[in-house]
Amino acid sequence: MFTEQHMYFDDVEVGQEWDSPGRTITETDIVNFAGLSGDFSPIHMDHAFAQTTPFRRPIAHGLLVLSITSGLATYSPPVRTIAFLKFREWVLRGPVFIGDTIRLRSKVLEKEARARGRRGLITWQRQIINQEAKVIQEGITMTLVEGRVPGREDETAAVQNEISGLSS
């Protein structure tokens, strides 16, 4: 459910940037993600094995880090997201270790109004940054965001059709 603090498509401007609060990665996060994903690779789970790697200790799953920052993105900025649509050019640049604190930096690159302003596409530059201010993952994402239009009727079918059209 959206609150009054959640911004509409109309409220964000190209060039605006936000930094999320920090989130520290724990060993529990890694173990839980391994159980959820089925990825029990020793680089994540086996401390003795990890000592033989260039990292010298276990690293977090790249998709775990991405998943956690998807949650951080819901607050920085808080927008009325209808659907997550696309990843583009996603790059993993460095490891995340147990005890690292990550933040998400979000910047609006493009906006495109849809459905006579009832919603719009926002293209974001996303950077995941660690406690040393190093970019560890980055790329481009697209979301569909609710517009500020009075008298809005239920548009579930129209939104589903629009999302289907973007997927192809």
Image: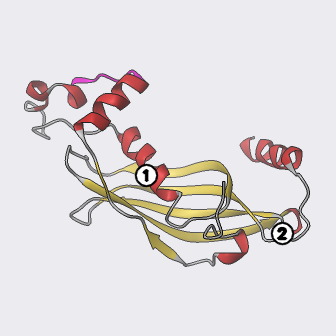
Label 1 near label 2: C-beta < 8 Å? no
Residue 23 at x, y percent in the picture = 33, 54
Indicate the secondary structure of the residue bearing disc 1.
helix
Q: Amino acid at mark 1?
A: Thr
Q: Amino acid at mark 2?
A: Gly
- Residue at 62 percent across and 63 percent down: it is 123
Magenta span: 37-42
Tag 2 residue:
117
Is 56 contained in the magenta span?
no
Residue 55 at x, y percent in the picture = 14, 41
- Residue at 22 percent across and 52 percent down: it is 100
Magenta residues: mostly which secondary structure?
A: loop
**In the rendered image of this protein, does residue 121 appear above or below residue 93?**
below
Q: Quarter of the image holding residue 1?
A: bottom right
Q: Neighbour class for label 2 at 10 Å: few (<14), some, many (≥20)?
A: some
Q: Of the two numbered discs 2 and 1 on the same chain, state the one appearing first in sequence.
A: 1
**Colour scheme of the picture:** secondary structure
Relative to the observer, which residue lies in front, 77 or 65? 77
Q: Is residue 30 left or right of residue 143?
A: left
Residue 37 at x, y percent in the picture = 42, 26
Q: Is residue 142 left or right of residue 39?
A: right
Tag 1 residue:
69
- Residue at 64 percent across and 64 percent down: it is 3
**In the rendered image of this protein, does residue 16 appear above or below residue 124?**
below
Q: Is residue 15 left or right of residue 98?
A: right
**Distance in Å between CA atoms under marks 2 and 1:** 28 Å
